[in-house]
Image: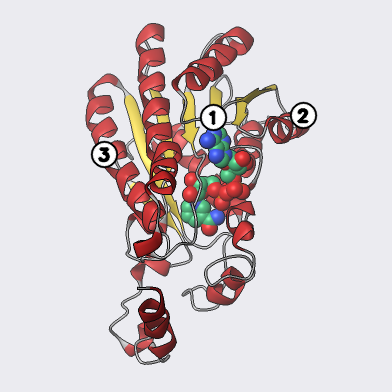
Amino acid sequence: MPEETPRLAGKVAVVTGAAGGIGAASARRLSHEGARVVVVDIDGDGAQQVAAELPGPAVAVTGDVSREEDVENYVRAALDTFGRLDLHHLNAGITGPFEDLADLSVADFDRVLGVNVRGPFLGVRAAFRRYREQGTGGAIVITASIASLRGSHDLLAYQTSKHGVLGLMRGAAMYGGPIGVRVNAVAPGLVPTGLFTAAKDASGGGDDMIRRGTTVPLRRTGTPDEVASVVAFLLSDDAAYVHGEVISVDGGSAIVSSVRPSGGAGAWDTTAVDERSKETS
Ligand SMILES: NC(=O)c1ccc[n+]([C@@H]2O[C@H](COP(=O)([O-])OP(=O)(O)OC[C@H]3O[C@@H](n4cnc5c(N)ncnc54)[C@H](O)[C@@H]3O)[C@@H](O)[C@H]2O)c1
């Protein structure tokens, strides 16, 4: 049997937040599928390490996605190294503090919105500028979240930002459709990564994620590789007619009806949750 050409052969891809977690898995997956990869992260050492371990050509760039000049810099690095840019996985994100709504500071709110919304906006804008220069189409995937689709108050700034990226994604898809640029989002559910470890054993952080994973319809948490495979699909021509879509990668979490017994209604006592709200309000 002749060897098949990998489906992303010839493409150059940028992945942001690629020093760990979902971004590193995406960089690996895109590289395995034939893309040359620009590994971007605020953690420069981590980005270097991931880039060095990829099976194909790669370059690491240290940068903060919320800063205009850093975004311009990673595009320049892609051009200097590989001469073009075709695919973007705009993935870098932070949770912000596990703070009660009433105590959330403006500075923390702005910081989360800066990385999670301004970052993808700058990335999308840079992508469109590049495609215009090249005279080509392209493909963009933004990492959204189940927090883009459902409500909770313990990560208020995060939830606000992740709802925001869907507006960005849909607007960019409307802009990009007629000029051959596909834009989509993935919405992971519970995926143990470095993102929540800072919260240690706080409710909603660290090991708690594994425990909460047992309530997901698939009864487990997901893996970064399981998100990365959907990203690779969306960035490839296999998804040539998928556009302006958000695909949940959450083991079924987003389909649960919380008002039916099969969705958990009545299965626990909310007193502890309500008491906590009263204490902190
Ligand atoms: N892990 C989950 O359960 C989960 C669920 C839903 C959505 N997400 C989203 O997935 C994306 C990746 O998260 P993860 O779980 O892999 O977390 P992670 O913390 O393992 O990885 C995030 C990466 O982004 C980098 N980063 C942070 N701020 C940055 C900045 N300003 N500029 C550049 N890089 C920056 C970090 O250094 C880190 O390497 C995030 O957008 C997150 O909101 C994660």
Q: Does the residue labelled 1 lie within 8 Å of ligand 1?
A: yes
**The residue tagged with tag 2: helix, strand or loop?**
helix
Left or right, residue 149 beside residue 224 = left
The residue at which mark 2 appears reads as 52
Q: Position of residue 147 (x, y in %)?
A: 38, 58
The residue under label 3 is which amino acid type? Answer: Arg
The residue at which mark 3 appears reads as 170
Crowdedness of circle 2 by 10 Å Cα count: few (<14), some, many (20+)?
A: some
**In which quadrant of the rendered view does residue 127 lie?**
top left
**Earlier-in-chain disc, 1 versus 3:** 1
Residue at position x 66%, y 38% from top? 19
Measured Cα–Cα span from mark 1 to mark 3:
24 Å
User: In this view of the protein, which residue sits in the foreground, 116 or 143?
Assistant: 116
Residue at position x 63%, y 11% from top? 81
Residue 187, relative to residue 136: is it above or below?
below
- Residue 64, which numbered label? 1
**Earlier-in-chain disc, 1 versus 2:** 2
Q: Where is residue 223 in the image (x, y as percent from the top left)?
A: 61, 57
**Label 1 with label 2: CB-CB less than 8 Å:** no
